[in-house]
Amino acid sequence: MKGDKIPDQDHIARYCRPTHTSDGQIQATAFMLRSGEESLSVNCLELLNCSGRESEVAQLRTIYATKLRSVGARAKIAILNVGEVRNHVLTESLDRRNLEVLHDPQSEDPSHSGIYNLREDDELIAELILTTVRETYNARA
Protein backbone atom coordinates (compact mmCIF):
# COMPACT_ATOMS: atom_id res chain seq x y z
CA MET A 1 0.00 0.00 0.00
CA LYS A 2 1.07 3.56 -0.63
CA GLY A 3 3.38 4.80 2.11
CA ASP A 4 4.27 1.34 3.45
CA LYS A 5 7.93 0.88 4.34
CA ILE A 6 9.79 -1.46 2.03
CA PRO A 7 11.40 -4.11 4.31
CA ASP A 8 15.19 -4.10 4.71
CA GLN A 9 15.47 -7.60 3.25
CA ASP A 10 13.81 -6.50 -0.03
CA HIS A 11 15.59 -5.31 -3.16
CA ILE A 12 15.08 -2.20 -5.23
CA ALA A 13 15.99 -1.30 -8.79
CA ARG A 14 16.95 2.14 -10.06
CA TYR A 15 16.73 3.10 -13.73
CA CYS A 16 19.98 4.89 -14.55
CA ARG A 17 19.75 7.13 -17.60
CA PRO A 18 22.56 7.03 -20.18
CA THR A 19 23.68 10.47 -18.96
CA HIS A 20 24.42 8.82 -15.60
CA THR A 21 26.69 6.14 -17.02
CA SER A 22 30.24 6.32 -18.30
CA ASP A 23 32.02 3.50 -20.12
CA GLY A 24 29.20 1.17 -19.06
CA GLN A 25 29.56 2.07 -15.37
CA ILE A 26 26.85 3.72 -13.31
CA GLN A 27 27.86 7.09 -11.85
CA ALA A 28 26.80 8.51 -8.47
CA THR A 29 24.71 11.15 -10.25
CA ALA A 30 22.17 8.38 -10.94
CA PHE A 31 21.30 8.53 -7.24
CA MET A 32 20.77 12.27 -6.94
CA LEU A 33 17.41 14.01 -6.85
CA ARG A 34 16.48 16.27 -9.74
CA SER A 35 14.98 19.66 -9.07
CA GLY A 36 11.44 19.36 -7.72
CA GLU A 37 11.66 15.68 -6.76
CA GLU A 38 10.86 14.63 -3.21
CA SER A 39 12.16 11.08 -3.54
CA LEU A 40 14.45 8.97 -5.70
CA SER A 41 12.31 6.78 -7.92
CA VAL A 42 12.93 3.03 -7.60
CA ASN A 43 11.03 -0.24 -8.03
CA CYS A 44 10.66 -2.87 -5.32
CA LEU A 45 11.53 -6.19 -6.93
CA GLU A 46 9.57 -8.28 -4.46
CA LEU A 47 6.40 -6.41 -5.43
CA LEU A 48 6.82 -7.60 -9.03
CA ASN A 49 6.01 -11.16 -7.85
CA CYS A 50 8.37 -12.77 -10.36
CA SER A 51 10.06 -16.16 -10.11
CA GLY A 52 13.65 -14.92 -10.29
CA ARG A 53 16.03 -12.11 -11.16
CA GLU A 54 15.87 -12.56 -14.94
CA SER A 55 12.08 -12.34 -14.94
CA GLU A 56 12.25 -9.31 -12.61
CA VAL A 57 14.62 -7.55 -14.99
CA ALA A 58 12.37 -8.43 -17.95
CA GLN A 59 9.38 -7.00 -16.09
CA LEU A 60 11.34 -3.81 -15.27
CA ARG A 61 12.24 -3.40 -18.94
CA THR A 62 8.53 -3.64 -19.81
CA ILE A 63 7.67 -1.03 -17.15
CA TYR A 64 10.39 1.34 -18.38
CA ALA A 65 9.32 0.92 -22.00
CA THR A 66 5.77 1.86 -21.00
CA LYS A 67 6.59 4.79 -18.68
CA LEU A 68 9.51 6.46 -20.43
CA ARG A 69 9.53 8.14 -23.81
CA SER A 70 12.52 6.02 -24.72
CA VAL A 71 14.92 3.70 -22.94
CA GLY A 72 18.45 4.75 -23.80
CA ALA A 73 20.78 2.20 -25.35
CA ARG A 74 23.35 2.82 -22.60
CA ALA A 75 20.82 3.00 -19.75
CA LYS A 76 21.37 0.61 -16.85
CA ILE A 77 19.36 -0.98 -14.08
CA ALA A 78 21.02 -0.92 -10.65
CA ILE A 79 19.91 -3.54 -8.11
CA LEU A 80 20.34 -2.72 -4.42
CA ASN A 81 19.32 -4.24 -1.09
CA VAL A 82 17.17 -1.86 0.97
CA GLY A 83 18.77 -2.64 4.35
CA GLU A 84 22.28 -2.41 2.96
CA VAL A 85 21.59 1.03 1.45
CA ARG A 86 19.92 2.34 4.61
CA ASN A 87 22.59 1.00 6.99
CA HIS A 88 25.54 2.13 4.87
CA VAL A 89 24.20 5.67 4.52
CA LEU A 90 23.28 5.83 8.22
CA THR A 91 26.72 4.74 9.42
CA GLU A 92 28.88 6.48 6.79
CA SER A 93 27.17 9.84 6.24
CA LEU A 94 28.32 12.83 8.26
CA ASP A 95 24.77 13.61 9.41
CA ARG A 96 23.90 9.93 10.06
CA ARG A 97 21.16 10.22 7.44
CA ASN A 98 18.23 7.87 7.97
CA LEU A 99 16.83 7.07 4.54
CA GLU A 100 13.34 5.66 4.15
CA VAL A 101 12.21 3.47 1.27
CA LEU A 102 8.45 3.72 0.87
CA HIS A 103 5.98 2.10 -1.51
CA ASP A 104 4.56 4.69 -3.91
CA PRO A 105 2.56 2.74 -6.52
CA GLN A 106 1.53 4.31 -9.81
CA SER A 107 -1.27 3.11 -12.07
CA GLU A 108 1.12 1.77 -14.71
CA ASP A 109 3.74 0.72 -12.14
CA PRO A 110 2.48 -0.99 -8.96
CA SER A 111 6.05 -1.75 -7.77
CA HIS A 112 7.07 1.93 -7.86
CA SER A 113 8.66 3.12 -4.64
CA GLY A 114 10.85 5.99 -3.48
CA ILE A 115 13.92 6.65 -1.40
CA TYR A 116 13.12 9.57 0.92
CA ASN A 117 15.16 11.95 3.11
CA LEU A 118 17.44 13.01 0.27
CA ARG A 119 18.28 16.54 -0.86
CA GLU A 120 19.15 17.80 -4.34
CA ASP A 121 22.81 18.46 -3.51
CA ASP A 122 23.54 15.14 -1.76
CA GLU A 123 26.69 14.14 -3.64
CA LEU A 124 28.15 12.24 -0.68
CA ILE A 125 24.90 10.34 -0.10
CA ALA A 126 24.74 9.51 -3.83
CA GLU A 127 28.32 8.16 -3.66
CA LEU A 128 27.41 6.04 -0.62
CA ILE A 129 24.34 4.61 -2.38
CA LEU A 130 26.44 3.82 -5.47
CA THR A 131 28.82 1.70 -3.38
CA THR A 132 25.93 -0.57 -2.36
CA VAL A 133 24.90 -1.52 -5.93
CA ARG A 134 24.86 -5.33 -6.05
CA GLU A 135 24.07 -6.00 -9.70
CA THR A 136 23.69 -4.08 -12.94
CA TYR A 137 21.79 -4.90 -16.12
CA ASN A 138 21.20 -3.19 -19.42
CA ALA A 139 17.87 -1.38 -19.32
CA ARG A 140 17.20 -2.52 -22.89
CA ALA A 141 16.99 -6.19 -23.77
Image (cartoon, rainbow, N blue to C red):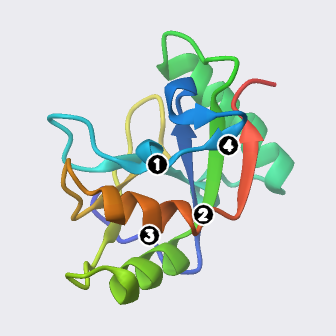
Q: Is residue 10 left or right of residue 56?
A: left
**Which residue matches tag 3?**
6
Point out which mark residue 122 bears: none
N-terminal of the two: label 2 or label 1? 1
Q: Which residue is denoted by mark 4 in the rendering?
A: 25
Nearer to us in this view, 119 or 121: 121
Q: Earlier in the sequence, mark 1 or mark 3?
A: 3
Amino acid type of the residue tagged 1 in the rendering: Val
Residue at the bottom extreme, as displayed: 91
Residue matched to label 2? 80
Foreground: disc 4 or disc 2:
4
Q: Residue at x 37, y 37 (%)?
A: 106
Where the N terminus falls, by quadrant? bottom left
Kind of residue indicated by mark 3: Ile
Res 1 seen here = no
The disc at residue 42 is 1
**Location of residue 73 (image quadrant):** top right
